[in-house]
Amino acid sequence: MSDTNMQVVRRLLEQVWSKGDLSVLPEIMATDFVGHAAPYGATLQGIEQYQQRIAVFKGIFPEIIFTIEDQFASGDKVATRWTARVRESLDTATRDQATGEPISVSGISIQRLQDGKVVESWENWDAMTVLESSDAPNLLDSLSFGI
């Protein structure tokens, strides 16, 4: 069961977030999903709000590539330490204002699964790196609507 749950979470990061394939969500996420999205404190209710959140991030950062650094499961929970590399397009990297380097954000997500679907999620990631980027005002404006 643990390996199966880890594969579900892997699909969430790789297919949904990295590739933008939202058609996968009904297969891997419960309709009554609840997301606790730190660091900005939003609570997401259901697949539709989760899709809106993805749209906000993809609208500002069209290319987000997640790499799973570590992952383990215990019972009905999966913990994943990941790195997201953010680019505006295939040719132009979103740059850190201080260093000029492409943005690389680290985070940890914990998902609780039931019957092969994510029912609850807790996320914590390095928001300061994103907030120091040139795209921070766009992201903050979008997230201020509670998405």
Image (tube, rainbow, N blue to C red):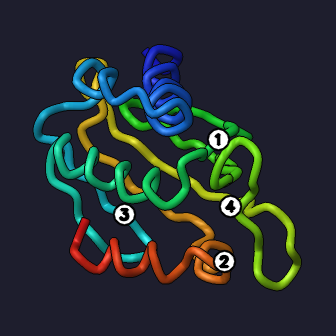
Q: Could you tell me the amino acid type at mark 2?
A: Ser
Query: Looking at the rendered structure, which numbered label has been put on residue 37?
Result: 3
Name the foreground residue: 26 vs 95: 95
Residue placed most toward the observer, 32 or 104: 104
The mark nearer the N terminus, 3 or 1, is 3
**Which residue is found at the position 58% from the left and 42% from the top?**
80
Q: Nearer the viewer, residue 6 or 89?
A: 89
Left-right relation of 13 to 66: left
Quarter of the C terminus within the rendering: bottom left
CA separation in Å, label 3 and label 1: 19 Å
Residue picked out by circle 4 = 105
Q: How far is disc 1 from disc 2 in space, using C-alphas?
A: 17 Å
- Of labels 1 and 2, earlier in sequence is 1
- Callout 3: SS: strand
Measuring from the top left, give residue 70's x and y in whole percent: 70, 39
Q: Amino acid at mark 4?
A: Val
Identify residue for label 1.
65
